[in-house]
Image (tube, rainbow, N blue to C red):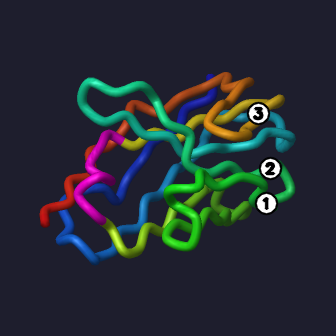
Amino acid sequence: EVQLVESGGGSAQAGGSLRLSCSVSGSTEDEYGVGWFRQAPGEDYEVLSCIDSRGVPFYYRDSVKGRFTISTDNSKNTVYLQMNSLNAEDTAIYYCASGRELSCWGTSFYGTDYWGKGILVTVSS
């Protein structure tokens, strides 16, 4: 069974940084993409950034472009989300998800097969 576990969340001041990690285990295939998502209280899920099976980023949400960076360490089966210049609007539960046919575009996404349980990020102003 594929499992994704997020870590690195917590509290930050506005203008600060956090780095989230998504550890993927149990996968017998290397051909899957991974995305980072978030859900603020009372809001829908938002797709933030996605990376393909080769480790090439192919999507950033407009609101995080230039502030968030997705990367991967294939040897560790880990995908990172470096978050800089945080603001209060970034407060949410952050999730990573994987999928063999993961697609991310505009404000939409498709093809997630497995999700982590999420981790809380709180940004205070």
Classify 56 as above or below 40.
below
- Label 3: which secondary element: loop
Report if the CB atoms under discs 2 and 3 are less than 8 Å apart. yes
CA gap, disc 2 and disc 1: 5 Å
Q: Residue at x 51, y 60 (%)?
A: 64
Q: Position of residue 37 (x, y in %)?
A: 50, 40
Mark 3 crowdedness (10 Å alpha carbons): few <14, some 14-19, many ≥20: many
Q: Residue at x 67, y 66 (%)?
A: 73
Q: Is residue 38 left or right of residue 25?
A: left
Residues in magenta, as a range: 87-93
CA gap, disc 2 and disc 3: 8 Å
Tell me which amino acid carries mark 3: Leu
Tag shown at residue 52: 2
Q: Which residue is mark 1?
A: 55
Residue 98 lies in quadrant: top right
Q: Is residue 42 left or right of residue 80?
A: left
Q: Position of residue 43 (x, y in %)?
A: 34, 27
Report if the CB atoms under discs 2 and 1 are less than 8 Å apart. yes
Residue 88 lies in quadrant: bottom left
Q: Position of residue 101 (x, y in %)?
A: 83, 29
CA gap, disc 1 and disc 3: 13 Å
Q: Which residue is mark 3?
A: 102
Tell me which amino acid carries mark 1: Gly
Asked if the magenta segment contains residue 20, the reply would be no
Q: Position of residue 13 (x, y in %)?
A: 17, 71
In front: label 1 or label 3 = 3
Tell me which amino acid carries mark 2: Asp
- The N terminus lies in quadrant: top right
Asked if the magenta segment contains residue 91, the reply would be yes
